[in-house]
Image (cartoon, rainbow, N blue to C red):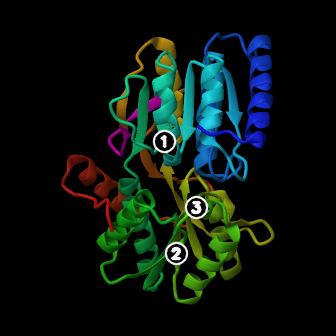
Amino acid sequence: MKLNGKNIITTLIMLIFLSFITINGLAQSDTTVGLVFDIGGKGDKSFNDSASRGLSWAAQDFGIKRIELEPGADADREVNVRNLSSIGYKLVIGVGFLFEDSIGDVSDEFPNTKYAIVDGIIPDKPNVVSLSFAEHEGSFLVGMIAGLKALQDGKDTVGYVGGMKVPLIQKFEAGYIAGVKYAYPECKILSAYAGDTPTAFADPVKGKELALSQYDNGAYVIYHASGLTGTGVYEAAKERKRYVIGVDSNQNYLGYIEETGENFGLTSMLKQVDVSVYLTVKSILDGTFKPGIRLFDLATSVVINGVEYNGVGYAMDQYNKDLVTPEMIKKVEEAKKKIISGEIKVPSEV
């Protein structure tokens, strides 16, 4: 790792800060967990916020000591991961596939530290678990909802806005397209990406621009998988009074227009990063941590504090209960069972 003067100063300040909170303690538990966000950071109302939510659940239930580190404009992932490791944090979590190199390197130097990476794959490391998701399966279900909504209202086009054009985000698109076509074979689908670099996940202006273009070209519903960029898609949806499907967290409320009482948040594809983070922390505490790849899919069933979660799914709440009919839900649930049984094979590539 190469450190310039700026990085050295940043590292020293971070070490002093982390050492201070470690010495003084933030909770009763001796278990220390550090979570490092990536592009978009906390407050993206989507991917990063889901990870933070899972860590909050763990803090409430287990009394762990935790810290969340925000990325900077030129965030050095390895510095953050290394800092947490060097002062003895028991579990370090990197949120996003961009942590593959940093966690892959640092985990070799700190064999007694456990690591988790969300969306990345780091195989054959005895102290690393890779938290993976069947995004295409959840996207298939919301694709069905998009297609059924368009069919019901006499429309023939839906859209998709992705963040960074990489295989992971194309996996969302592949499932979505398959779901739309399963419900409404004749439906047309418009697709666009915000860019080819990580900043594509943090560009609401671009998100709005792409969404407006798709709405103006006939899209009745747009599904976004673009992190913070998706807040721009919601702005466009409310301006054009067309529907939008959120991602990762339940974003249905983002489509609500308070002045009129209208809501254009059709549903959201739930990717339970929160559940994966919570269960990983729990595994450290109960001694069941296992390295390798842990998949969260439609067949995953986990109960946390009396609430059952699947690995992926779709959101229903007070904001969209009048938008998605019982007949639509029945068809989606029937397809869900067929996916779990293997009768429906959802593609993961476009």
* Among the two numbered marks 3 and 2 on one chain, the one whose residue lies closer to the N terminus: 2
**Residue 69 sits in which quadrant?**
top right
Q: Quadrant of the C terminus?
A: bottom left
Q: Is residue 306 visible?
A: no
* Residue occupied by mark 1: 101
Q: Residue at x 46, y 18 (%)?
A: 111
- Tag 3, which secondary structure? loop
Crowding near pointer 1: few (<14 within 10 Å), some, many (20+)?
few
Magenta stretch? 295-303
* Residue occupied by mark 3: 320
Mark whose residue sits in front, 3 or 1: 1
* Residue occupied by mark 2: 221
Depth check, front residue: 42 or 152:
42
Q: Residue at x 70, y 28 (%)?
A: 67
* Among the two numbered marks 3 and 1 on one chain, the one whose residue lies closer to the N terminus: 1
C-alpha separation, residue under disc 1 versus residue under disc 2: 37 Å
**Position above or below: 184 against 291:** below
**Going by the image, does 314 lie left or right of 31?**
left
Depth check, front residue: 154 or 45:
45
Q: Is residue 302 magenta?
A: yes
**Position above or below: 77 against 74:** above
Q: Quadrant of the N terminus?
A: top right
- Amino acid identity at mark 1: Asp
**Position above or below: 174 against 51:** below
